[in-house]
Image: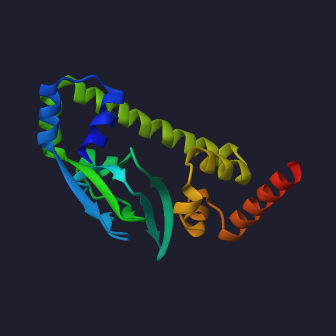
């Protein structure tokens, strides 16, 4: 598991063995069972998690209804960046959609690491940039794209999502009803069959 995280880091920044040893002292391994929470709304996000296997769903609970904010899969971080940075309670929940293995980093430990090793500051800058771009793309998609285009983008950018995530969560993420997502999916399947 730690090798997966090291490999991910090496694709983003350059580091030497001393810098990696410092990082290794700061990380922990955590396993979540399906439906186990990594973070609950109202709690401060004390750790960010890097998913080595499995997936999480980020969701708000609004009037008793779960509204999906995002999905996180392998080789991505999960948690609440806002809560982690500000030390204020998170506004959403993070739950494992399947048995999930994570590498976790605690806020206080990470601060010390970043102060001592420039390469890890670069990694955090790159990861935060990824989150910002993803957020902007999602906002733009909601404003400019059709329901069909949002569905296609989700499927194309997340291979295997249809096998790993239930229809109701995909619909919630897209801001659609499950029936609408079913119609879109059926239409696309029928159109692809007609073209073949």
The residue most toward the bottom is 64
* Quadrant in the rendering for residue 161: bottom right
Q: What residue appears at the point 37 percent right and 64 percent down from the top-left corner?
A: 95
- Count of number-bearing discs: 0
Q: What residue appears at the point 50 percent right and 62 percent down from the top-left corner?
A: 68
Q: Give the camera-side residue of 27 and 108.
A: 27
**Is 83 left, or right, of 115 in this rendering?**
right
Residue 190 picture location, percent across and down = 83, 59
Q: What residue appears at the point 63 percent right and 44 percent down from the top-left corner?
A: 141
Q: Give the camera-side residue of 64 and 72.
A: 72
Examine the rendered structure and indicate whether residue 113 appears above or below residue 103: above
Residue 25 picture location, percent across and down = 11, 41
Examine the rendered structure and indicate whether residue 63 appears above or below residue 102: below
**Is 37 left, or right, of 131 in this rendering?**
left
Q: Give the camera-side residue of 74 and 114.
A: 74
Q: Give the camera-side residue of 20 and 176.
A: 20
Colour mode of the rendering: rainbow
Residue 39 visible (yes or no):
no
Residue 89 picture location, percent across and down = 28, 58
**Is 79 left, or right, of 46 in this rendering?**
right
Residue 65 picture location, percent across and down = 50, 74
Residue 34 visible (yes or no):
yes
**Is 56 left, or right, of 141 in this rendering?**
left
Q: What residue appears at the point 41 percent right and 57 percent down from the top-left corner?
A: 55
């Amino acid at each position: 598991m730690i090798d997966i995280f090291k490999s991910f880091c090496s694709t983003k920044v350059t580091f030497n063995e001393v810098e990696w040893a410092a990082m290794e002292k700061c990380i922990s391994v955590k396993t979540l069972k399906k439906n186990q929470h990594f973070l609950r709304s109202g709690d401060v996000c004390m750790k960010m998690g890097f998913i080595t296997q499995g997936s999480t769903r980020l969701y708000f609970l609004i009037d008793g209804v779960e509204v999906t904010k995002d999905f996180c899969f392998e080789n991505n971080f999960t948690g609440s960046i806002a809560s982690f940075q500000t030390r204020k309670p998170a506004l959403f929940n993070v739950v494992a959609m399947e048995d999930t293995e994570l590498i976790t980093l605690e806020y206080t430990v990470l601060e010390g690491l970043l102060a001592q090793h420039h390469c890890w500051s670069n990694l955090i800058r790159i990861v935060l940039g990824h989150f910002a771009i993803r957020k902007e793309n999602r906002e733009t998609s909601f404003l400019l794209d059709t329901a069909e285009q949002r569905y296609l983008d989700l499927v194309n950018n997340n291979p295997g999502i249809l096998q790993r995530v239930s229809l109701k969560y995909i619909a919630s993420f897209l801001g659609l009803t499950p029936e609408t997502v079913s119609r879109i999916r059926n239409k696309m399947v029928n159109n692809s069959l007609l073209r073949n």
